Image (tube, rainbow, N blue to C red):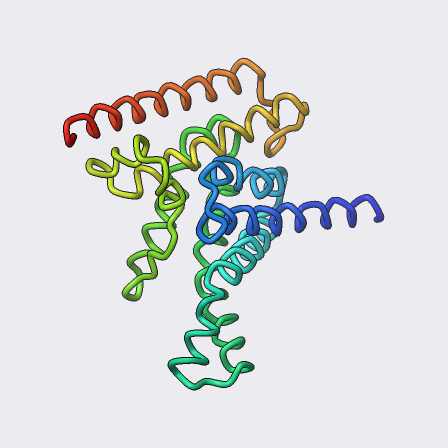
Amino acid sequence: MGKNRNIAIAKYAGAVCSGLLLTASFPNLGSPLIAWFALVPLMASLRNCSPMGSLRLGYLFGMIHFATLTYWVIPCLKTYGMIPLYLSLIILFLFAAYLSLFTAGFALAVNRICRDAKMLSLIGPALWVVFEYARAHLFTGFPWELLGYSQYRTLPLIQMADITGVYGVSWLVAMGNIAVFLIYLSLAGHKWNGHVLSKKYAVVSLAGFITILALAWGYGMWRMGCIE
């Protein structure tokens, strides 16, 4: 009983940690490097998790991230809408609660579709982009600080957006997170949904990511040279 409780606490802590790390990837803190591992604690929390547990963890991750990311809603409502502080806080909570549906959907999709670590490496980044695209367009959308925007300072990397849009950058950053997670998974000897991940595949996954990153970077350098 105590062991299960400790595992549950660790999983929730991982979701909270990822939410805070992802927020720290954007302005005002704005460190692009953080985005490349911000999702790793969440992925670790989703390991060997039930569908409902994954849904809860994804929702908690989203609540922490969006509540800390869109804090500016409160002063805007107070200053320009003349709305009392307590109502502004309620509106922020409801806003974050809505946006968190998309991160909860991502976590559930990972649980149901990515039954082993290989599927996670191949499909996981695309699942992130699917739910990010839905957030940006559904019900007029809210494309505020998509994952790819975290790389706004990394000029060579974001040149690929002239082909893929911001979603291509988001896909690459999500791929990097999953590659880092798979290395952790193999080194720690942990299973993903009951499946053992070989160190060889984890290294291949990381090498594949580095290759794509290098190609994107090379294209960006060439593209910037053309503009100059």
- Which is nearer the eye, 86 or 110? 86
The x, y position of residue 204, in whole percent, is: 47, 16
Q: Is residue 30 left or right of residue 129?
A: right
Q: Residue at x 20, y 35 (%)?
A: 163
- Which is nearer the eye, 65 or 203? 65
- Which is nearer the eye, 131 or 15? 15
Q: Residue at x 61, y 22 (%)?
A: 186
Quarter of the image where the C terminus is located: top left
Please say if 210 is above or below 155. Answer: above
Q: Residue at the front extreme?
A: 228
Q: Residue at x 54, y 52 (%)?
A: 58
Q: Residue at x 46, y 39 (%)?
A: 113
Classify residue 218 by image quadrant. Answer: top left
Please say if 226 is above or below 207. Answer: below
Classify residue 175 by image quadrant. Answer: top left
Please say if 175 is above or below 73. Answer: above
The x, y position of residue 106, in whole percent, is: 46, 48
The x, y position of residue 208, in whole percent, is: 40, 19
Q: Residue at the right extreme?
A: 2
The x, y position of residue 43, in whole percent, is: 56, 39
Q: Is residue 223 left or right of residue 139?
A: left
